């Protein structure tokens, strides 16, 4: 009864679709024009807030105290290098002043917290016979003379900024520019690409010379470089389109059907991007792979439909009947595969990081567009245009000839002996891959920005900072919360000092600084600079006096929060985890109603929160994706055997993909987590099509060996071609200008090929072991 009802519904849809073909084509043309217009409004959309898990406890605390910390998390560092000498040169300092002024007026800079040798907040302090004295590092009396330059050198040494804002060898200094999240003039989010471009044009290009070197690091600059890489990716998309078009024409020998198939896949991308623009979404560097994935999924289904139409044409059907029969054969499995893809991708939305949520929406909507363009528009177009009869005859003859060669070998995977061997090999790969994948780590595993190539200018700039400065740019900030006026209490300062000692003795920590250090220096200063007095004083009046000169950002106005800055050697996941582990253990031991140690700000604190979310989500996401796919397969085929045969090859590929990540030195992070889940969606298409065709031939009374031979001669051809064509197309990404896109290209190439191999070899082997000879379906 259920089968008859499905057939009736399919026939009704079929009749409505093909009886109103002209209306369908006009509707699609109008919508495509509207969506193409919407794409012209698409803008890059990469924000600091999109990259962080806003609901994580670390981030909640960071956002609560953000204004009081002076931009410690999203900061650009501009290194101005004196290539021919030292910074103690009048020409160098004049250039530094000009660059500082230039940066001050850049749109998006937090001007109140800008720091440079020329800014008033760069001060020195010393103890003299008359008491404390101090002033700006470059005094108002500076005139460029030898005497003035000597004073500047002395002031730098007394400012404790050597190794922090001034290089250890005095050959460069840093302009530290915190970046706002919202433009105060327009209220719009900061345009990171525009900001990065301004840094290049107004700083590096304008002031860089043979004598002055400019190096720029920071989140805003990194995102700007990634967005520039996204623009180049459009070229790779075009190259992949040309490669796949050429391969499809070579496979089908029919130019018009190949153009229609790829055209419908491109229309799906146009609809997806146009719809996202209409909904207010932009394109960020991490979702750039989504349009290609949509195109790949669309091309996969288009190839199946064209292949089925060609077979019907070769059997003698006219173009209209051939298209209708192809639609009838593939509507159910195609819809199942696409719905599985869409819902599976949407499961990524549970990860509480906005950039991944947007990626999930983009992928889910994109697959829904493929359902319309490649399962509705394409068969209607083929019913009007048809496929070449000559090409269909040649393709049918080629398949018949191949039946005695390579494809007879592929069909042999349904034989019991080879099936057992195949399953044993798959089990071995699963075990070996699982053993290797056990070493998969969370977060960044390299110094610098792993999203870019090691020899990129950005990573060379990061390396320069690490080599020439005592403290790195990787900062973890601990927020010490107290009762009003409690941050200056002796008990608070003593606990902070104790935590600093523990952190200073933690591997991966370069050093720490807090108001406890400032208080100890103040006590020393009140006692003629005697080192014996470099300690905390229990007298509250003395403590208050020592902290009266604390730099801005270390204490909030009502003294309910003070910060402890931890400088890390790098931002590797292990380094960050070691430091945060010490802080969490200390907080658990000493937190009370009036004193709490909270993580975490700084770029390392935000990365720690992100790593925590990714670690707790990675297997949950995969489990949800597989659960969704399993349920839809059960609904469609009403068979546990079908579910096992289709899912197990995907699981093998997922495990091997994780093992590949370990081998490539890739960690699981925002850029990589979605790829494994998306790879499952692409792979399930192969298995569903192969199993559906195999079930069809079994229902006709063929034994398993004959049914699978017929399957590989038809659907198997298309699956093999699709997997290889998509792999060749996406392999061009390996040459992308950004490393994470190159890594994604390698990962997707691997998953395309292995999902295809699994569908053609492991799937029939599993069916053989689950089928008694003589049974059908």
Image (cartoon, helix red, strand yellow):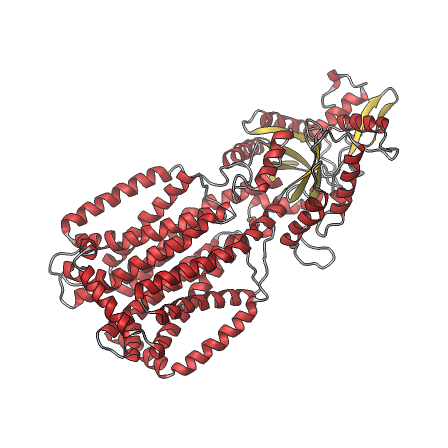
Q: Is residue 650 above or below residue 489?
A: below
In this rendering, does residue 655 appear at all?
yes
- Which residue corresponds to the image point at 78% horizontal and 28% vertical from the top-left? 546
The picture places residue 73, in percent across and down from the top left corner, at 64, 43
Q: Residue at x 41, y 69 (%)?
A: 264
Q: Position of residue 109 (x, y in %)?
A: 71, 48
In front of the other: 257 or 609: 257
Screen quadrant of the N terminus: bottom left
Residue 548 can be seen, yes or no: no
168 to 665, vertically: above or below: above
Quadrant location of the C terminus? bottom left
**Residue 762 rendering spot, x and y as whole percentages:** 24, 51
**Residue 348 horizontal/vertical position (percent):** 45, 55
> Is 556 on the left-hand or right-hand side of 704?
right
Q: Is residue 124 found left or right of 75 in the rendered image?
A: right
Query: Quadrant location of residue 90?
Result: top right
For residue 261, which quarter of the picture? bottom left
The image shows a total of numbered marks equal to 0
Instruction: Relative to 568, say whether 109 is above or below.
Output: below
For this view, does 587 lie left or right of residue 361?
Answer: right
Name above or below for residue 16 compared with residue 374: below
């Amino acid at each position: 009864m259920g089968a008859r009802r499905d057939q009736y519904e399919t026939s009704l849809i079929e009749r409505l679709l093909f009886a109103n073909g002209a209306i369908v084509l006009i509707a699609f043309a109008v919508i495509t024009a509207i969506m193409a217009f919407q794409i012209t409004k698409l803008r890059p959309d990469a924000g600091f807030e999109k990259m962080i898990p806003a609901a994580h406890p670390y981030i909640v605390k960071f956002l609560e105290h953000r204004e009081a910390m002076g931009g410690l998390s999203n900061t650009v560092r501009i290194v101005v290098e004196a290539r021919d000498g030292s910074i103690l040169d009048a020409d160098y300092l004049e250039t530094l002043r000009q660059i500082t002024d230039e940066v001050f007026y850049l749109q998006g800079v937090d001007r109140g917290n800008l720091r440079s040798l020329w800014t008033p907040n760069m001060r020195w302090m010393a103890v003299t016979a008359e008491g404390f004295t101090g002033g700006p590092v470059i005094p108002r009396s500076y005139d460029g003379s030898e005497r003035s330059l000597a004073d500047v050198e002395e002031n730098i040494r007394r400012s404790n900024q050597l190794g922090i804002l001034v290089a250890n060898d005095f050959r460069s200094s840093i302009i530290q520019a915190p970046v706002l999240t919202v433009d105060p003039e327009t209220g719009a989010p900061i345009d990171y690409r525009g900001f990065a471009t301004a840094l290049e044009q107004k700083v590096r290009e304008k002031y860089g010379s043979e004598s002055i070197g400019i190096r720029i690091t920071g989140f805003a600059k990194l995102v700007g470089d990634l967005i520039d890489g996204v623009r180049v990716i459009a070229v790779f998309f075009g190259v992949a389109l040309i490669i796949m078009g050429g391969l499809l024409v070579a496979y089908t020998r029919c130019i018009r059907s190949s153009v229609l198939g790829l055209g419908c896949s491109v229309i799906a991308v146009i609809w997806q991007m146009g719809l996202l623009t209409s909904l207010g979404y932009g394109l960020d560097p991490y979702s750039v792979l989504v349009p290609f994935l949509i195109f790949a999924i669309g091309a996969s289904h288009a190839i199946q439909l064209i292949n089925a139409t060609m077979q019907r044409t070769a059997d003698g059907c006219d173009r209209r009947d051939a298209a209708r029969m192809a639609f009838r054969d593939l509507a159910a499995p195609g819809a199942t595969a696409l719905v599985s893809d869409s819902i599976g991708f949407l499961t990524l939305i549970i990860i509480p990081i906005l950039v991944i949520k947007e990626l999930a929406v983009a992928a889910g909507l994109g697959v829904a567009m493929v359902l319309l363009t490649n399962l509705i528009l394409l068969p209607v177009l083929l019913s009007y245009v048809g496929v070449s009869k000559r090409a269909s005859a040649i393709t049918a003859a080629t398949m018949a000839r191949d039946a005695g060669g390579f494809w007879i070998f592929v069909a042999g995977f349904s034989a019991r002996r080879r099936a057992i061997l195949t399953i044993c090999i798959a089990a071995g790969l699963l075990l070996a891959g699982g053993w290797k994948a056990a070493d998969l780590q969370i977060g960044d595993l390299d110094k610098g920005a792993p999203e870019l190539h090691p020899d990129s200018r950005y990573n060379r700039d990061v390396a320069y900072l690490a080599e020439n400065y005592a403290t790195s740019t990787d900062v973890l900030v601990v927020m010490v919360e107290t009762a009003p006026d409690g941050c200056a209490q002796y008990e608070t300062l003593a606990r902070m000092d104790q935590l600093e000692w523990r952190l200073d003795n933690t591997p991966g920590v370069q050093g720490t600084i807090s108001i406890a250090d400032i208080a100890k220096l103040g006590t020393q200063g009140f006692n003629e600079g005697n080192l014996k007095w470099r300690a905390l004083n229990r007298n509250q009046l003395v403590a208050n006096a020592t902290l009266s000169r604390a730099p801005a950002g270390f204490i909030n106005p009502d003294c309910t929060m003070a910060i402890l800055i931890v400088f890390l050697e790098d931002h590797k996941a292990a380094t960050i985890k070691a430091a945060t582990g010490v802080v969490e253990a200390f907080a658990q031991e000493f937190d009370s109603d009036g004193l709490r140690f909270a993580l975490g700000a700084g770029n390392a604190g935000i990365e720690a929160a992100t790593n925590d979310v990714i670690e707790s989500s990675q297997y949950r996401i995969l489990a949800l994706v597989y659960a969704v796919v399993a349920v839809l397969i059960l609904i469609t085929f009403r068979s546990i055997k079908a579910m096992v045969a289709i899912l197990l090859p995907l699981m093998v590929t997922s495990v091997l993909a994780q093992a590949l990540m370990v081998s490539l030195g890739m960690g699981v992070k925002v850029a990589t987590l979605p790829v494994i889940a998306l790879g499952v969606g692409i792979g399930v298409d192969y298995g569903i099509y192969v199993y559906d065709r195999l079930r069809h031939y079994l229902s006709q009374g063929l034994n398993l060996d004959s049914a699978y031979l017929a399957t590989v001669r038809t659907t198997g051809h298309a699956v093999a071609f699709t997997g290889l064509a998509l792999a060749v197309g996406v392999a061009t990404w390996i040459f992308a200008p950004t490393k994470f896109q190159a890594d994604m290209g390698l990962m997707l190439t691997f998953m395309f090929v292995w999902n295809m191999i699994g569908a053609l070899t492991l799937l029939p082997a599993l069916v053989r072991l689950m089928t008694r000879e003589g049974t059908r379906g």
